[in-house]
Amino acid sequence: MCASAKLIVFDCDSTLSAIEGIDELGRAGGPEMFARIEAMTNDAMNGKLPVEAVFGERLRIIRPTSEHVAAVGRRYIETVEPTAKTALEALRADGWTPLILSGGFRNAIRPLADHLGIARVEAVDLFFDAQGDYAGYDEAYPTTRSGGKPEVIRALKRELNPSRVVMVGDGVSDLETKPEVDLFVGFGRYVAREKVRASASAFVHSLDELPALLRGL
């Protein structure tokens, strides 16, 4: 990436897609498991619990298989934000390079990224054995803990040297990047979190609002 390039970083869950991938993995275990996982996710995304308090525990409860993760990958595409493709086309025309930064799972997000033409995904890798059974996750990856997304943003700036960085997301973990980016845009189509709305530099309900918002930045 040349120094003049502009980087726009998207959260995935409840931003580029309507779903929360971890909740969908929990759904495979039945209604009781789904409700338990969904509650844990909401507590983390609303800032009531640190990410690290729920990250490994949710996976321990679910123990997702590779088949379940592939199904979530398909579900991401089925529930893609309806204006995402046109918004991304307009942003690219204005010189922005999109990237996904997620506390979700790279294995599941990659199909959505391919669908949207996004080359790079920064997310957590899940591991499986030869039978496709759960074998753990990359516990060292920054987005498994609070403060992880700003850490990744700092690393991206060192690596890519972009002229501008914008972050778009719905959760408190996204909001944590605000000191590291030129503009933090809160997103509220699926979940409008009051803490994010109150602290965001801008707040949108549709991704196709972004091109006009970012012109001149």
Image (spheres, helix red, strand yellow):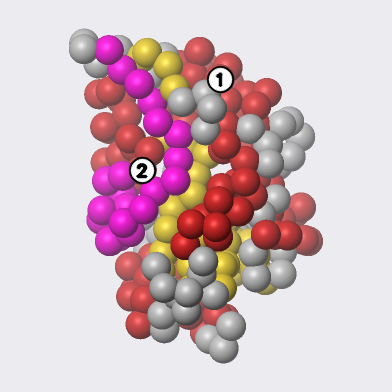
- Above or below residue 177? Residue 102 is above
Residue drawn at x 48%, y 74% is 3
Question: Between 71 and 214, which is closer to the camera in this rendering?
Answer: 214
Label 2's element?
helix
Which quadrant of the view contains residue 82?
bottom left
Residue drawn at x 55%, y 57% is 158
Kind of residue sitting beneath label 1: Gly
Label 1's element?
helix
User: Is 91 placed left or right of 217 in the picture?
Assistant: left
User: Is 72 placed left or right of 185 in the picture?
Assistant: left
Magenta-span inclusion, residue 118: yes
Disc on res. 72: none
Magenta-span inclusion, residue 107: no
Find the magenta span and give its range.
Answer: 110-129
Q: CA distance from mark 1 to mark 2?
A: 18 Å
Q: Position of residue 39 (x, y in %)?
A: 62, 28
Q: Position of residue 9 (x, y in %)?
A: 50, 60
Disc 1 crowd rating (10 Å Cα; few below 14, some 14-19, many 20+) is some
User: Is 92 placed left or right of 45 in the picture?
Assistant: left
Disc 2 crowd rating (10 Å Cα; few below 14, some 14-19, many 20+) is many
Count how many numbered circles sit on residues in the image.
Answer: 2
Residue drawn at x 44%, y 46% is 122
Question: Between 173 and 157, which is closer to the camera in this rendering?
Answer: 157
Q: Is residue 31 visible?
A: no
Disc on res. 109: 2
Considering every residue shown, the one lying at the far left of the view is 130
Kind of residue sitting beneath label 2: Ile
Q: Position of residue 87 (x, y in %)?
A: 40, 73
Q: Earlier in the sequence, mark 1 or mark 2?
A: 1
Residue on which disc 1 sits: 56
